[in-house]
């Protein structure tokens, strides 16, 4: 059975702090790892990672994948209150049948 | 483009009632999926489709039916609603190896 484990499950920080969210996985036939941000409604896509060691960056957010150790991290620098959300990690392990397995998410709260 | 549209946004049912959650996408995506999201459980795959006329079961398919008669639409049917099906339901679509696009969700309560 495929597994995706995120840690911590929740985190409270102050504006300006830097946070690191973790995602480890055990899946067959790994294809890619995806990060999503979920506020009140639909998850919105942040990053898709397929290769080890290549950092993806978007503004204050960055992510990297380690396929040998089977984990990924999502970094957020200089956090803002608008970063408060649930961050979801998902792994695509589909082969010919696309299958996306989600972790339980990390609830990030950024206080002013 | 509207993206992925789900209706209704909220619904309350009584145990034993049936209903259909609608999902439509206007991006000509071949892949569509239904997930449920429960507190502390993340998103779990119910059913998915790789194209019109083709559907398959996900992780938690019991109590749900789907069909895919057109590329655009992927309705989810609850045949006899149970309190355990109280959840937030998300429909998603994608093309090729691109990330999934999610609808805004349907919040369903079964009394």
Image (tube, coloured by chain):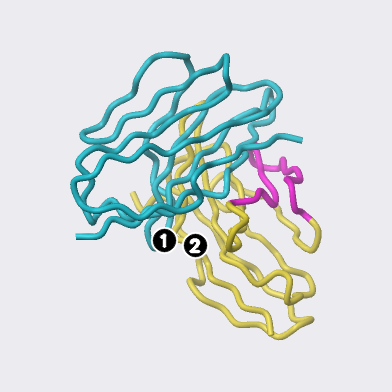
- The answer to whether residue B71 is above or below residue A56 is below
Mark 1 and mark 2 residues within 8 Å of each other at the beta carbon: yes
- The answer to whether residue B100 is above or below residue B36 is above
Q: Position of residue B54 (x, y in %)?
A: 72, 40
Q: Nearer the viewer, residue B26 or A109?
A: A109
- The answer to whether residue B74 is above or below residue B78 is above
Circle 2 sits on which residue? B105
| Mark 2 crowdedness (10 Å alpha carbons): few <14, some 14-19, many ≥20 | many
- The answer to whether residue A72 is above or below residue A55 is below
**Residue B46 lies in the magenta-colored region:** yes
Q: Residue at x 70, y 53 (%)?
A: B67
Q: Residue at x 24, y 44 (%)?
A: A17
As helix, strand or loop, the secondary structure at mark 1 comes to loop
Q: Position of residue A38 (x, y in %)?
A: 41, 53
Circle 1 sits on which residue? A41
Q: Residue at x 58, y 38 (%)?
A: B31
Q: Nearer the viewer, residue A91 or B16?
A: A91
Which numbered dot is residue B49?
none
Distance from label 1 to label 2 (Cα)? 7 Å
Read off the magenta span: B43-61
Is residue A79 rendered to the left or right of residue A97?
left
Q: Which chain is yellow?
A: B
Magenta segment's dominant SS is strand
As helix, strand or loop, the secondary structure at mark 2 comes to loop
Colour assignment, chain A: cyan
Quadrant, the N terminus of chain A: top right
């Amino acid at each position: 059975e495929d597994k995706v484990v995120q840690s911590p499950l929740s985190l409270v920080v102050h504006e300006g702090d830097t946070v690191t969210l973790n995602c480890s996985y055990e899946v067959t036939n790994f294809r890619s790892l995806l990060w999503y941000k979920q506020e009140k409604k639909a998850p919105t896509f942040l990053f898709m990672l397929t290769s080890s060691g290549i950092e993806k960056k978007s503004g204050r957010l960055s992510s990297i994948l380690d396929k040998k150790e089977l984990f990924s991290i999502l970094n957020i620098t200089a956090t803002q209150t608008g970063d408060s959300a649930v961050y979801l990690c998902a792994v695509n392990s589909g082969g010919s049948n696309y299958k996306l397995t989600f972790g339980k998410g990390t609830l990030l709260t950024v206080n002013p | 483009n509207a993206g992925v549209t789900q209706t209704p946004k909220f619904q309350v049912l009584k145990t034993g009632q049936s209903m259909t959650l609608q999902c439509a996408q206007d991006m000509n995506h071949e892949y569509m999926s239904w997930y449920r999201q429960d507190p502390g459980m993340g998103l779990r795959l119910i059913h998915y489709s790789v194209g019109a006329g083709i559907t398959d079961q996900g992780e938690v398919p019991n109590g749900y039916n789907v069909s895919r008669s057109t590329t655009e639409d992927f309705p989810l049917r609850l045949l006899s609603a149970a309190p355990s099906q109280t959840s937030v339901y998300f429909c998603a679509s994608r093309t090729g190896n691109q990330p999934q696009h999610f609808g805004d969700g349907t919040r369903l309560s079964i009394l």
